[in-house]
Image (spheres, rainbow, N blue to C red):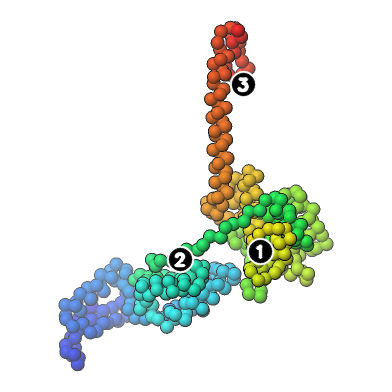
Amino acid sequence: MGSVHSYESAAGRRYRVAYRKPDRSQGQKRGFTTKRDAELFLAQVEVSKARGEFIDANAARATIGQLGAEWLATQTHLKPSSLRPVEIAWRVHVEPVWGDRGIGSVRHSEVQAWVSKLGTRKSATTVLRAYGVLAGILDVAVKDRRLASNPARGVNLPRKGKRARVYLTHDQVERLAAASGEHATIVHTLAYTGLRWGEVTALRVRHVDALRQRLQVAENAVAVGREIHVGTPKSHEERSVPFPPFLAEPIARACEGKERDELVFAGPYGEHLRRPNTSENTTSWFLRALTAAGLERMTIHDLRHTAASLAISAGANVKAVQRMLGHASAAMTLDVYADLFDDDLTAVSTALDEARTAAIVAKPLSREATRGGEVVELPRKSGGVVVKS
């Protein structure tokens, strides 16, 4: 148990509470004007210790800047392409505003005001990323018993606007490939296998199974600044993706004369290709091909969406599409491409209607056949009788 002691100050008698922390170190709090207030505080301390909810007030004095550096150092599970925007969010949006603040001084209303202000000049993606950094740091503070709760949780956040996906038809894919020149095989591969840009540009000759007409997706090449980082696919798992027979010859030509570890699709010096820029006021082989093919502006990633669309329209089920695209679950595939599977539901409804109509029409015909005359057995398939008049 702790204890309560009185002492004299310039303002008169005051009370000090002395107590032991869970780690057996000594703690105290001064300045209580009445003994009762001091005793109530001590009782709260003892209850919080018994419940395992004790928060050390001194620990809450640590700044967000101090904990932020520690938090960033623990994000080793992120791939370089994911870590870089997080580091930028910390350096540009979080540290300048919150770095010098003690974690115990942060108020929920302050976080809400910061999020709202940031949203007036930055995209929802930028706001959500910056907020995620601040909230993540304070989450660790809660787990470390530096804070009782996270003041950043529960604020109103902006919603990301959904960009309309582009689904090309077979004819449009052909026009785009024809206009892509030396990149035609890449366009076809993206549109008919659903590989991500980083996956198709990381394909090596040894990843191509010409006999089974399959591509082994084992690596992913991502540009981080000026460097290309090669790691595992986005799902961290390898997968085998089939390609249609018409691609066998073009892919074989892309592999011709190359060693097993060389890239199938490479730059002039054997380097990884960089994703073509499709933003405004820029030019790239992909944008030139879109213009030549008479197609609206789209991103290279839309060819992955096109692959999903073409596969589903060809009759592929959700599990097959999931495996082709490398999604973590079929539920994720349904979430992403719900609009495409809605068309399947319409087809199911139409098929059910046709089956019902056929069954109802068949009944009157079978009754008509039994009116008067000689009864003969039908073939086993029909399971009924026919009456000859």
Residue 10's place in the image compared with 247, above or below, is below
Residue 139, by quadrant, is bottom left
> Residue 124: percent from the left, percent from the top?
49, 67
Which residue was labeled with disc 2? 158
Task: For marks 1 and 2, give the CA distance.
Answer: 29 Å
Which residue corresponds to the image point at 59% horizontal and 57% vertical from the top-left? 165
Q: Where is mark 3, residue-wise?
A: 381
Cα separation, mark 2 vs mark 3, equals 63 Å
Q: Position of residue 229 (x, y in %)?
A: 65, 70
Q: Write the residue at 52% across / 53% down.
A: 335
Pick the front one: 22 or 204: 204
Q: Between disc 3 and disc 1, whose residue precedes?
A: 1
Q: Which mark is residue 198?
A: 1
63 to the left or right of 365: left
Please report whichever mark, 1 or 2, sits nearer to the chain's N-terminal start. Answer: 2
Q: Which of the marked residues, 2 or 3, is nearer the chain's N terminus?
A: 2
**Separation (CA) of disc 3 from disc 1:** 55 Å
Mark 3, Cα crowd under 10 Å, few <14 / some 14-19 / many 20+, is few
Label 2 or label 3, whichever lies nearer to me, is: 2
Amino acid tagged 1: Gly
Are the residues flagged by discs 1 and 2 in contact, CB closer than 8 Å? no
**Where the C terminus falls, by quadrant?**
top right
Residue type of the residue flagged with mark 2: Pro
Q: Position of residue 66 (x, y in %)?
A: 45, 81
How many C-alpha atoms fall within 10 Å of the one at disc 1: few (<14), some, or many (≥20)?
many
The quadrant of the image that shows the N terminus is: bottom left
Residue found farthest to the right: 257
- Give the amino acid type for the residue marked by disc 3 in the picture: Lys
Q: Secondary structure at mark 3?
A: loop
